[in-house]
């Protein structure tokens, strides 16, 4: 297996109109399509063969950190405490998927790939298997009880909204009266909405989403700014709605997808610190600054006796090339992450969190998700004319992010039962 470890900072287009031009292509990534097409055919035959001989579970894709296949491959009950849950591989599991998106009113149409015409279904059948332990089987009754009277809050961009939708659908499989689960303001899920909160009334808890794509505050053009400046990101101020995130039991953050020239400089958005414009500040430096602001905020306002804080690392994408106009969703995970297991955003998150006194759990999903070129919405979105290899199908990879999140509630780090 070839290990490609390159720092990649590429342009991304998530939601909204495509930027007219694309800035700062730092790395040119060659197209491996034809090479891994052959490998995929090999994997395909291996999968069918092994299924045919009755292997329910098996290793197919060893991760980068896994050099050997020494461990037994059946599910065991080894605890996740002290285990690196993110070191593992994807295995075929026929008990997946865990829900039907067409029966869950909280999956937005754009992510329901089957309903949008996707025919191949192998992408639904993968489970993440940590090398040295097992993620506990999703036990919806147990989780619903753990969440009783709690407030779970997701904060971030559309990737966070996907995870929010996924968690609600996972939990709804354990609720008999589907009408007892509702959005608190009667809103439908839309891309630009600032707040969505779904209440599970029989269990007295809510799962909420706050759209805050940068986490820090987006402001209007300051006076005396150069003409090209149309708005600013105020790096030393957390988003103005942040006070609403505080009184929660579980807080899950993400950011990253919008920290690209196409969403910033090319729309006239530049950085600001205090009253000063920082026209020359690079995106990685600004990202670090913003996370520092986030960290101080957490240290200051979070009640560490009550709130469990998570930060999900960067979600990899699988565009064919820098132009972000082309991508082919594969039928099977790719055998090689081709460098997508690395991200400057994820590295920065880990570094900032290391320095904090409030314990933060980083959900390091970057490398595990990097294999899943088969799980993007592609052309099976609400806008089939534009392929999308950033967002993920539901059911799909975000369900696994949630299973990992939920596993923390059952381990040492448990949410106390009411
Ligand atoms: C796994 O669980 C079974 C019973 O459910 C128990 O007998 C066994 O000791 C457990 N194994 C480990 C490694 O904890
Ligand atoms: C999901 O539910 C819809 C509507 O009930 C049904 O038509 C469809 O066959 C189901 N899909 C799967 C994969 O079970
Ligand atoms: C519902 O949850 C809230 C906290 O979110 C708690 O204060 C209240 O007592 C709970 N109500 C019931 C009936 O358990
Ligand atoms: C939500 O969508 C449904 C069906 O498309 C529509 O009937 C309803 O009016 C919408 N609700 C809101 C608050 O927009
Ligand atoms: C948190 O819990 C510790 C130990 O249980 C207690 O000493 C401390 O006062 C609590 N802090 C707050 C802010 O409630
Ligand atoms: C991207 O890939 C497409 C199709 O593979 C190709 O037509 C296009 O020229 C490529 N663009 C760049 C900038 O490499
Ligand atoms: C994507 O697939 C189509 C049809 O299967 C093929 O014509 C095209 O060349 C592929 N594009 C890339 C970038 O692999
Ligand atoms: C960690 O915190 C110390 C003290 O606040 C600071 O000097 C140092 O630069 C921080 N390091 C990182 C990586 O943020
Ligand atoms: C988790 O619990 C196990 C046994 O219950 C214990 O051995 C371990 O030290 C605990 N880990 C932490 C981080 O508290």
Image (cartoon, rainbow, N blue to C red):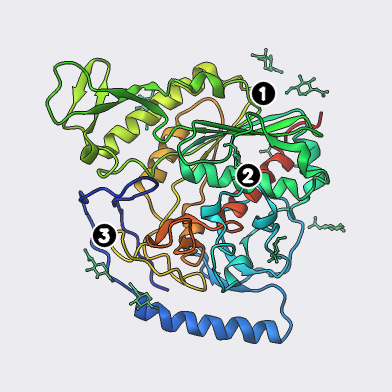
Q: Is mark 3 within 8 Å of ligand 6?
A: yes
Q: Nearer the viewer, residue 225 or 366?
A: 225
Residue pictured at 58% horizontal, 59% vertical: 396
| Tag of residue 323 | 3
Percent position (x, y) of residue 308? 62, 31
Q: Residues within 10 Å of mark 3 (few under 14, many from 20)?
A: some
Q: Give the residue pinned by disc 1.
A: 306
Q: Give the CA distance from mark 2 to mark 3.
A: 33 Å
Which mark is in front, 2 or 3?
3
Residue pictured at 46% horizontal, 65% vertical: 373
Question: Which comes before the other along the chain, label 2 or label 3?
Answer: 3
- Secondary structure type for disc 2: helix
Percent position (x, y) of residue 180? 78, 37
Q: Is residue 31 above or below residue 271?
A: below
Q: Is mark 2 within 8 Å of ligand 9?
A: no
Which mark is in front, 3 or 1?
3
Q: Give the residue pinned by disc 2.
A: 405
């Amino acid at each position: 297996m070839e290990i490609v470890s390159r720092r990649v900072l590429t342009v991304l287009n998530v939601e909204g109109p495509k930027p007219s031009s694309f800035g700062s292509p730092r790395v040119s990534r060659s197209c491996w399509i034809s090479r891994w097409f052959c490998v995929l055919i090999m994997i395909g035959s291996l999968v069918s063969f092994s299924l045919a001989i009755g292997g329910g579970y098996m290793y197919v894709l060893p991760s980068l950190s896994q050099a050997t296949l020494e461990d037994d491959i059946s599910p065991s009950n080894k605890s996740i405490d002290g285990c690196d849950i993110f070191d593992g591989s994807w295995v075929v599991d026929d008990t997946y998927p865990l829900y039907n998106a067409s029966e869950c009113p909280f999956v937005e149409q754009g992510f329901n790939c089957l309903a949008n015409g996707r025919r191949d279904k192998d992408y639904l059948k993968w489970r993440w298997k940590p090398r040295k332990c097992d993620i506990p089987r999703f036990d919806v009754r147990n989780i619903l009880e753990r969440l009783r009277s709690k407030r779970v809050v997701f904060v971030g961009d559309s990737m966070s909204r996907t995870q929010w939708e996924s968690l609600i659908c996972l939990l709804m499989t354990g609720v008999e009266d589907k009408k007892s689960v509702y959005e608190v303001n009667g809103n439908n899920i839309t891309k630009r909405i600032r707040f969505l909160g779904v209440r599970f009334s029989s269990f007295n808890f809510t799962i909420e989403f706050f759209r805050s794509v940068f986490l820090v505050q987006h402001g209007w053009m300051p006076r005396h700014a150069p003409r090209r400046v149309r708005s600013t990101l105020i790096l030393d101020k957390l988003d103005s709605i942040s006070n609403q995130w505080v009184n929660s039991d579980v807080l899950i953050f993400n950011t990253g997808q919008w920290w690209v020239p196409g969403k910033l400089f090319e729309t006239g958005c530049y950085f600001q610190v205090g009253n000063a414009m920082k026209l020359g500040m690079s995106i990685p430096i600004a990202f670090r600054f913003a996370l520092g602001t986030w960290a101080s905020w957490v240290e200051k306002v979070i009640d560490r006796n009550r709130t469990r804080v998570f930060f999900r690392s960067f979600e990899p994408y699988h565009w064919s090339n820098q132009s972000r106009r082309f991508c082919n969703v594969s039928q099977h995970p790719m055998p090689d992450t081709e460098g997508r297991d690395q991200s400057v955003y994820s590295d920065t998150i880990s570094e900032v969190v290391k320095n904090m006194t409030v314990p933060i759990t980083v959900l390091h999903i970057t490398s595990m998700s990097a294999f899943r070129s088969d799980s993007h919405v592609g052309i099976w979105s609400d806008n089939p004319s534009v392929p999308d290899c950033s967002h993920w199908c539901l059911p799909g990879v975000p369900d696994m992010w949630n299973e990992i999140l939920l596993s923390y509630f059952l381990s040492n780090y448990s949410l106390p039962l009411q």
